[in-house]
Image (cartoon, rainbow, N blue to C red):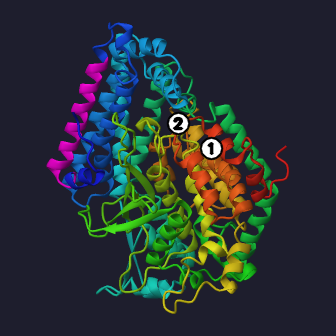
């Protein structure tokens, strides 16, 4: 019998080429054993079609595949050894090939179809699982001819390889430029200290987030900032644009082979939104409603650009200057000094504060461990129940940038929980991967956007590790993709109140708590620029939808230009290729709208916390029970209604955006 040891064992094993390959081999072998066992029951008598032998075993296949793929999938993006990364990459195509074959396995399908007829009344979670498994067999081509099935397998294999290459190109692409020391004018002292002058008298900047974001925000040398922006949006340009064009053709072919008009229609069938028309209506409703406020904000940006002399020759404002102008407007209109604010957000203090807040809300203890990890910067923590001492989960925090590492911020599931046949609970594990400034010559200070990002990703972590779902397939973040961002975006709210900021916001030198002179401007300025920021998110969502609803053969760059003109008042930077750097196209394909969809739900869920108190443990425990622990064991709309005592609505989010009518 396959042994599901503590997830830390898998992480430690996977740190070598042999180890990561072994994880894949053993997980796939267990998945094949389970598949064979289910298939052998295709002609069995009804009494042999028990839950444990059929759908229970099918859920265990998902466990085995997760054991095979999760650590290798993470190490593809974060392991410092290129040889381990290459070995890890070899696993995903093997797992995807197994899944493709599994859903074309007529014997397994016959067993499961027969079991569904004789199992009788099950729990809500089990009934939902039965329906979703049978649906997925239909969606994965079981009814296709042998020739069509063969083509589907080719398409799946090609899509896996193309997506891997796209993400690998981005992870390994860090461009750099050199500037004179004078071009650091406007940057915080800590940033300047961490960018020493080289022997050639120049300073080196990279396109990695800790270099990129502060420079765009603060640099007075706007020509240099625009050049850094251009470099960041030309990474992997030639290779990834070609990959994207091939991927869009392959997705369209697969969707039509399976009987769907577009890839978006195929993807959205399993989401809360259900079909592209609902997504388009949602996006248009927000875009139209934001028009008055968007015009006001755009005028303010244009005025500030004229005032500081960074208007382009054609009279427009560059998108590369938007963050710089936003910062200056906040300082002039709201007296918000972003650099002074950052002095209260030292990275380790923020990390400790987030853990303290989570501990107080959910009754958990976070204990740092001295265990092997894939890099010296990575920390491991065990989360335990403070009252009972029960081990809830293992968390790995990989917070700082390095060569060859994933460039953004994300949570990676390493194992979902599930209940074994003996009633025991398997311990889940997850990794939080970010690119925050690393403590060095000077303190590592976060801006408030980075603080909210930290809360966001930790919200995902809690969703995974606090789950109590019985089925692995429904545990943690295994929910509808347009719901998965609800817990993460909700937890961002804890970065905005005096009560919660007082837990950790202390001056890194004096220990002074965040003063009202900074807190009040922070809160007052929160919704400034929100119309433009939201429209940027709507642009990304619409771009994703257009890519996956239009007939293939179009130029992806032309669609970017077309939609940019509709959604942004800012001028695009010439000689860039945004779509080549839009990594979400490989993981959130036809689903990027989910961030806004889930944000609307998160604002609604927040109404109860806002009424009862963000640090009220009783409310947090009710939320934990209704949503975090449930995972995907019930319909997502039911989970929200269970917590709020009413159906979800958009009113809180519309009010936040200042939309009074959506026409």
Residue drawn at point x = 30 percent, y = 50 percent? 7
- Distance between the Cα atoms at labels 1 and 2? 30 Å
Closest to the observer, 305 or 316: 305
Closest to the observer, 408 or 479: 479
Task: Report the side of 182 relative to 648 (left or right).
Answer: left
Contact? badges 1 and 2 (CB < 8 Å): no
**For residue 609, above or below residue 39:** below
Task: Report the side of 581 relative to 283 (left or right).
Answer: left
Closest to the observer, 402 or 546: 402
**For residue 177, above or below residue 380:** below
**For residue 40, above or below residue 299:** above
Residue 595 visible, this angle: yes
| Residue 565: assigned label | none
**For residue 166, above or below residue 360:** above
Q: Which quadrant is the N terminus positioned in?
A: top left
Neighbor class of circle 2 (other Cα within 10 Å; few <14, some 14-19, many 20+) is many
| Residue 542: assigned label | 1
Please, which residue is most extreme toward the left here?
Answer: 18
In terms of image quadrants, where is residue 365? Answer: bottom left
Residue 25 magenta: yes
Residue drawn at point x = 62 percent, y = 36 percent? 272
Residue drawn at point x = 68 percent, y = 38 percent? 280
Please, which residue is most extreme toward the front here?
Answer: 388
Residue 539 magenta: no
Please name the predominant secondary structure of the magenta segment in the image: helix
Neighbor class of circle 1 (other Cα within 10 Å; few <14, some 14-19, many 20+) is many
In terms of image quadrants, where is residue 471? Answer: top left
Name the residue that disc number 2 marks. Answer: 633
Q: Position of residue 537 (x, y in %)?
A: 62, 53
Residue drawn at point x = 52 percent, y = 46 percent? 629
Segment tinted magenta in the rendering: 14-38
* Nearer mark to the viewer, of 1 and 2: 2
């Amino acid at each position: 019998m396959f042994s599901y040891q503590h997830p830390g064992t898998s992480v430690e094993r996977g740190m070598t080429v042999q180890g990561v390959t072994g994880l894949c081999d053993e997980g796939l072998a267990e998945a094949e054993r389970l598949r064979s066992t289910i298939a052998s029951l295709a002609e069995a008598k009804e009494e042999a079609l028990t839950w444990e032998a059929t759908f229970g075993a099918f859920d265990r296949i998902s466990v085995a595949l997760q054991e095979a793929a999760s650590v290798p999938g993470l190490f593809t993006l974060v392991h410092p050894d290129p040889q381990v990364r290459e070995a890890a990459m070899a696993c995903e195509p093997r797992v995807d090939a197994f899944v493709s074959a599994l859903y074309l396995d007529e014997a397994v399908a016959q067993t499961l179809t027969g079991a569904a007829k004789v199992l009788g009344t099950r729990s809500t979670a089990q009934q939902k699982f039965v329906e979703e498994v049978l649906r997925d067999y239909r969606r994965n081509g079981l009814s296709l001819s042998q020739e069509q099935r063969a083509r589907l397998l080719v398409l799946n294999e090609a899509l896996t390889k193309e997506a891997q290459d796209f993400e690998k190109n981005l992870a390994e692409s860090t461009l750099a430029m050199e500037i004179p020391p004078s071009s650091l004018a406007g940057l915080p002292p800590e940033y300047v200290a961490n960018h020493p002058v080289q022997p050639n008298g120049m300073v080196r900047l990279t396109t990695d987030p800790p270099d990129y974001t502060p420079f765009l925000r603060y640099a007075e040398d706007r020509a240099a900032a625009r050049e850094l922006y251009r470099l960041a949006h030309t990474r992997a340009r030639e290779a990834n644009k070609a990959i994207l064009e091939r991927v869009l053709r392959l997705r369209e072919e697969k969707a039509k082979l399976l009987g769907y008009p577009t890839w978006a229609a195929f993807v959205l069938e399993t989401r809360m939104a259900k079909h592209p028309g609902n997504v388009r209506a949602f996006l248009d409703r927000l875009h139209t409603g934001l028009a008055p406020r968007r015009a006001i904000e755009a005028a303010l940006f244009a005025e500030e650009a004229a005032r500081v002399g960074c208007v382009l020759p054609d009279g427009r404002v560059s998108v590369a200057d938007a963050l710089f102008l936003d910062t200056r407007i906040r300082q002039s209109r709201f007296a918000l000094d972003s650099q002074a604010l950052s002095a209260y957000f030292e990275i380790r203090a923020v990390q400790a504060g987030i853990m303290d807040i989570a501990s107080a809300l959910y009754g958990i203890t976070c204990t740092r461990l001295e265990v092997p990890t894939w890099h010296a910067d990575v920390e491991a923590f065990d989360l335990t129940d403070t009252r009972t001492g029960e081990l809830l989960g293992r968390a790995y925090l990989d917070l700082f940038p390095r060569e060859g590492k994933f460039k953004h911020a994300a949570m990676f599931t390493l194992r979902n929980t599930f209940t074994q046949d003996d009633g025991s609970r398997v311990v889940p594990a997850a990794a939080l991967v970010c690119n925050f400034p690393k403590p060095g010559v000077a303190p590592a200070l976060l801006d408030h956007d980075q603080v909210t990002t930290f809360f966001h990703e930790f919200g995902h972590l809690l969703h995974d590790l606090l789950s109590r779902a019985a089925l692995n397939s429904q545990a943690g973040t295994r929910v509808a993709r347009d719901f998965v961002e609800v817990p993460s975006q909700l937890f961002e709210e804890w970065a905005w109140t005096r009560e919660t900021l007082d837990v950790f916001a202390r001056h890194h030198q004096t220990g002074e708590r965040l003063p009202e002179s900074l807190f009040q401007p922070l809160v007052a300025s929160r919704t400034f620029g929100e119309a433009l920021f939201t429209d940027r998110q709507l642009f990304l969502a619409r771009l994703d939808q257009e890519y996956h609803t239009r007939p293939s053969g179009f130029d992806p760059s032309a669609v970017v230009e077309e939609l940019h003109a509709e959604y942004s008042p800012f001028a695009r930077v010439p000689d860039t290729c945004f779509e080549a750097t839009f990594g979400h196209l490989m993981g959130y394909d036809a689903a990027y709208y989910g961030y806004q969809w889930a944000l609307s739900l998160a604002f609604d869920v927040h109404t109860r916390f806002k009424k009862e108190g963000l640090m009220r443990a009783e409310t947090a425990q009710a939320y934990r029970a209704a949503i975090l622990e449930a995972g995907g064991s019930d319909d997502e709309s039911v989970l929200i209604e269970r917590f709020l005592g009413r159906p979800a609505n958009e009113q809180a989010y519309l009010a936040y955006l200042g939309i009074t009518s959506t026409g």
